[in-house]
Amino acid sequence: MSNMSLVLVITIVVFFGHIGDSEGGDLRKNFYKSACPLAEEIVKDITWKHAASNSALPAKFLRMHFHDCFVRGCDGSVLLDSANNKAEKVAVPNQSLTGFDVIDEIKEKLEETCPGVVSCADILALAARDSVSFQFKKSMWEVLTGRRDGRISRESEALSNIPSPFFNFTTLKQSFANKSLTLHDLVVLSGGHTIGVGHCNFFSNRLYNFTGKGDQDPSLDPTYASQLKAQCKTLSDNATTVAMDPGSPLSFDSHYYKAVNRKQGLFQSDAALLTNLESRKIVNELLDQDGFFTEFGQSMKRMGAVEVLTGSNGEIRKKCNVINREREREREREREREMSNMGLVSVIAMVVFFGHIGDSEGGDLRKNFYKSACPLAEEIVKSVTWKHVASNSALPAKFLRMHFHDCFVRGCDGSILLDSTGNNKAEKEAVPNQSLTGFDLIDKIKEKLEETCPGVVSCADILALAARDSVSFQFKKSLWEVLTGRRDGRISRESEALSNIPRPVFNFTSLKQSFANKGLTLHDLVVLSGGHTIGVGHCNFFSNRLYNFNRKGGKDDQDPSLNPTYASQLKAQCKTLSDTTTIVAMDPGSLLSFDNHYYTALNQNQGLFQSDAALLTNKESSKIVNKLLDQDRFFTEFGQSMKRMGTVQVLTGSNGEIRKKCNVIN
């Protein structure tokens, strides 16, 4: 490196900052000009050839690129096949994608021309642009290049990051904000729905069961709804497809916005654009087609830069559907060297026979994990926790919620405990976590454990145990078993908390999907919702049910599923939509007692949040609610579901670390 004037390179990096950063990178125009001058021409030629005979391709590629960028950034991870895990391709939002064979054909041609140079991520970004551009015989927007390919693709991340067609305006806006995209980008990129089709099951609830009472979405044009019902005859039809832009499914134009203004947006997420004054204004501006084309190109350029891998990050895949085998072999050799250095030859034999141990998607948690290395660990956690709960009755609800929020973001890895740094906002900063307290107590427990057995007990295990012990204080015995052996994560991002933690405004479909993303069942959803039997909620998380449920405003715009007497009581406490400070008991009449009264309140239509009320909108979940009116049964089921949740995507073995302090990585 000395021959390459390394000193000069270091000076440049210090002056200008890290180059090729994984959160943005140095994409540029004509990146392949020297190394593969015909790259963009090859992509265009093959794409246009297929678009000429397959008019559905532009919509497919546009959607594929969009879904790629919303999961781990624009890194081509949507192209990877499942191997040792389920990849993004198999996630429900991606199951109808096609065109992977065309991407493979382009890659094969590029590998013949300039092997190992052009990334699959860039191919997809270019093919999306070129397929849409075929209609106009000219490039509709500029694509900067220089992306590299990611090595990880997970079904669960696709499910939790790709905006759902059931999203309301607030959730949509947050989903885009998580990717550093604006409200303007949201409205503009929604215009991509001017081409392509949607499956009936992604909107049929608007036709047959909008509020769970066998009704139709009142915001849907009645004539259009009748036309849709003629095509989608049942709620469960998952095979029939319908044009997303009625009357213009194959032409890329601004007609989508005309349809939205006529209340003919197919999805709930389309209709949501009219529920906000600012977004509605943008919809009207985009009725001008030239303006739409300009704005769409600019927003696509911004989206194409989301969390890209550049420089030495990632790789250039040889085949777009698999990561490079050389890299995998090198990783395997590294693991073998580590095991050998630790004298674990016998463990290698066990791994070969029994399979990989300590896997990051489940791990080998066990009872009394610290029995030998720190025998007093669980007793220390319990004694410190009980001491503080005795003087702070709100602590059980706080710890239960903290553990829940931790497990739903990167798994139960203690990432929620990490503080923000100069260049990263941690999960603590996210709106759902801003009211959490008790971090100081976790720090005290950790300090005591470090004195007793330094570097042994993880912060993730401390939180799992403290959640159980704080709730158990009321009964003076452990209410459920906590398996231990978790290790601590090193990454904590505000954006991931916002996109993964279930929201109090979720309907049943979104709730069920959110839990399914974490490998949890409908039964777990209903049981764990029972945690709302203790604790409080801030007015702004449910006041729309009191004052603006149908977005019409006024004293009569109240959620009809809310008990009127209970609603009056809530209005007496939460006097405005914008009240962010007042708090209300989540389980009226049983605020501090951990019991099954939550389900009694729920059956009386006194669930505080929309997500609580949603449990009664589904026959199966409603049935589970009634079963949990038996308190002994609730205690048993709650313990089992907490045990299952506590194993979500845990880090074990050599993954992660054991933090010395819970609020900072080592």
Image: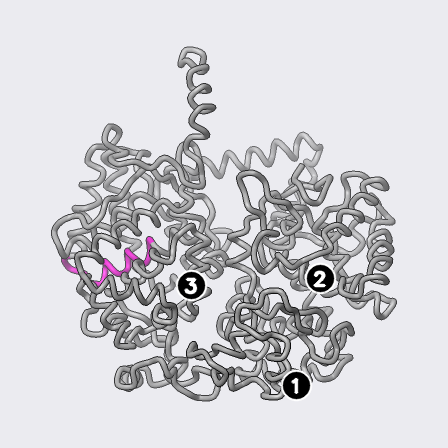
In this view, the residue farthest toward the top is 3
At which x and y percent is residue 123?
29, 45
Q: Amino acid at mark 2?
A: Lys
Secondary structure mostly taken by the magenta-highlighted segment of the chain: helix
Separation (CA) of disc 2 from disc 1: 26 Å
Q: Residues within 10 Å of mark 1 (few under 14, many from 20)?
A: some
Q: How many marks?
A: 3
The earlier-in-sequence mark between 2 and 1 is 2
Separation (CA) of disc 3 from disc 2: 28 Å
Mark 3, residue position = 172
At which x and y percent is residue 558?
51, 83
Compared with 597, 53 (above or below) is: above
- Tell me, for residue 626, which label it has, or none: 1
Describe the element under mark 3 as helix, strand or loop: helix
Mark 2, residue position = 398
Compared with 581, 145 (above or below) is: above
At which x and y percent is residue 396?
76, 64
Q: Amino acid at mark 3?
A: Leu
Magenta stretch bounds: 52-65
Q: Quadrant of the C terminus?
A: top right
Identity of the residue drawn at 41% across and 56% down? 176
The earlier-in-sequence mark between 3 and 1 is 3
Identity of the residue drawn at 78% across and 79% down? 632
The answer to whether residue 54 is magenta is: yes
Asked whether, in this view, residue 433 is left or right of residue 37, the answer is: right
Asked whether, in this view, residue 537 is left or right of residue 176, the answer is: right
Q: Are marks 2 and 1 in contact (CB under 8 Å)?
A: no
In this view, the residue farthest toward the left is 137
